[in-house]
Image (cartoon, rainbow, N blue to C red):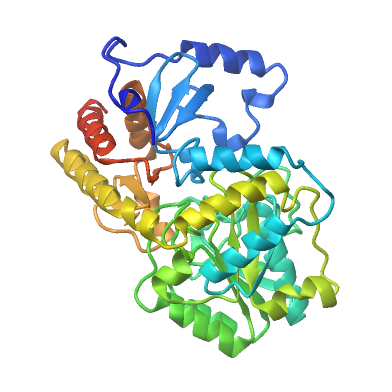
């Protein structure tokens, strides 16, 4: 439990937060770290990337002395809130036993068994160090098992930063091309253009397009976010996931759900449990260990066994590192019965409704979409989005201004529109947040 006194606003602080010390620290760190950060996704924050001293429950405490209500949650992992005592205790206990063995631990097998009891598709799994690595492992398994090369991904879906999948993630009106045959747009300079030569792009939520493309029976894998979380909180239309599942089965194509965001967040078994559609493989990352670097690829045993009998190579020095496994074991046990995830829902629903109401009162067109544990706020949208192209009408600049106004009032929200909730975002935190939303909406 977080300190009750810490949950109350500090009336001794000035009305608006300042971030001068963070700015100085980032400038100093930039002498050795490009941009003062170790991930490009931490650049460009308004008004500066923050430097944090400590965290507890739903709060961050930065080097300027600000107490911030946090909806970044480490970009998603902190579903049990920051610094939970049970995870701390388990990690400290494992530290007494060792850090890295270059061998297996019993704890690794225990976490794997628990994981497989929770996730519908998971007959077996391999641990990795990140979601990006899990995606690469899944694609390798699919190609090894099918003997095919082509992979289908969808506009706006993010599957990591590697060259072969960082394609058509942030397409624009100018470069997207025909909606029926979208262009392949690289996401970075320096990418190898041959890396995505076997990756084809389709528009998501268009079942007919998937069925038509798979009819040739030459596609190794279809990979998708089962909820389009990274770009805009878009839910699958009725029948879409099952329709793609059926089309993949007919074509002998491996269906991969990228559950790096949705896994263990929207349900104990991820979006596949929520929607009742089981993929062949799925990738996980964010919520597996509540802030420790644990990810996984899971799925059918015959596919995972390609790593043993099929010649597919998978490695990683830090895979299933024992300290991280200790954190994973506590986290998954806390989420396994579903009560913790379900407990977030009423607070998330109230927050979603309150944000929509305050934005409407301020005359800001917007859509609040997704599920209570992870939702998206899209400024400029006058109707719900069903495809990535519907999101192209968002007023991103105004939303960034809104984020800046929220941060000035000590609530931290992601500039890309996603809001993550934890089990520690209680009624009082939602009250405080909505009061800030009302002020920020009027100010931006």
Q: Residue 351: image x %, image y %?
A: 25, 45
Evaluate whether residue 364 shows in this view: yes
Q: Residue 114: image x %, image y %?
A: 58, 64
* Total marks placed: 0
Please tell me which residue lies in front, 113 or 141.
113
Residue plotted at (48% across, 43% down): 78
Apparent side of residue 296 relative to residue 396 in the rendered image (left or right): right
Residue plotted at (63% across, 28% down): 37
| Viewport quadrant of the C terminus | top left
Q: Is residue 143 above or below residue 408?
A: below
Evaluate whether residue 156 shows in this view: no
Residue plotted at (27% across, 47% down): 347
Q: In which quarter of the image is residue 93?
A: top right
Q: In this view, does 191 lie above or below 209?
A: above
| Most distant residue in the left direction | 361
Residue plotted at (76% across, 59% down): 194
| Viewport quadrant of the N terminus | top left
Q: Residue 364: image x %, image y %?
A: 22, 40
Please tell me which residue lies in front, 10 or 370.
10
Q: Residue 77: image x %, image y %?
A: 51, 46
């Amino acid at each position: 439990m977080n300190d009750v006194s810490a949950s109350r606003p500090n009336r001794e602080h000035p009305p608006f937060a300042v971030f001068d010390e963070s700015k100085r620290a980032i400038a100093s760190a930039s002498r050795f770290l490009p941009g003062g950060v170790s991930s490009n996704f931490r650049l460009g924050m308004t008004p500066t990337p923050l430097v944090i001293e400590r965290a507890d429950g739903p709060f961050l405490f930065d080097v300027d002395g600000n107490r911030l209500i946090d909806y970044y949650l480490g970009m998603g992992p902190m579903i049990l809130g920051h610094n939970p005592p049970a995870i701390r205790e388990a990690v400290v206990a494992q530290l007494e036993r060792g850090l890295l063995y270059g061998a297996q631990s019993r704890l690794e097998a225990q976490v794997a068994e628990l994981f497989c009891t929770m996730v519908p598709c998971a007959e077996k799994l391999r641990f990795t160090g990140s979601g990006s690595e899990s995606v690469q492992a899944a694609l390798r398994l699919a190609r090894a098992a099918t003997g095919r090369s082509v992979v289908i991904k969808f506009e706006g879906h993010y599957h990591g930063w590697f060259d072969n999948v960082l394609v058509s993630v942030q397409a624009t009106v100018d470069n997207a091309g025909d909606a029926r045959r979208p262009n392949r747009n690289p996401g970075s300079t320096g990418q190898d253009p041959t890396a995505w030569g076997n990756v084809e792009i389709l528009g998501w939520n268009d079942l007919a397009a998937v069925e038509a493309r798979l009819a040739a029976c030459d596609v190794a894998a279809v990979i998708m976010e089962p909820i389009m979380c990274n770009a805009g909180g878009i839910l699958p239309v009725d029948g879409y996931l099952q329709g793609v599942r059926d089309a993949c089965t007919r074509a002998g194509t491996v269906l991969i759900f990228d559950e790096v965001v949705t896994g263990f967040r929207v349900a104990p078994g991820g979006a596949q449990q929520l929607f009742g559609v089981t993929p062949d493989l799925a990738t996980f990352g964010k919520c597996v260990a509540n802030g420790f670097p644990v990810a996984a690829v899971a799925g059918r045993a015959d596919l995972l066994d390609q790593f043993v009998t099929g010649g597919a190579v998978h490695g990683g020095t830090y895979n299933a590192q024992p300290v991280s496994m200790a954190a994973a074991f506590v986290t998954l046990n806390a989420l396994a019965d579903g009560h913790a995830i379900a407990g977030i829902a009423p607070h998330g629903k109230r927050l979603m409704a309150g944000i929509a109401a305050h934005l409407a009162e301020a005359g800001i067109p917007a859509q609040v979409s997704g599920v209570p544990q992870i939702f998206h706020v899209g400024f400029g949208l006058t109707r719900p989005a069903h495809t990535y192209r519907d999101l192209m009408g968002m007023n991103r600049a105004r939303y960034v201004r809104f984020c800046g106004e929220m941060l000035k009032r000590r609530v931290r929200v992601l500039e890309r529109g996603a809001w993550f909730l934890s089990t520690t975002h209680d009624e009082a935190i939602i009250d405080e947040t909505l009061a800030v939303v009302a002020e920020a909406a009027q100010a931006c």
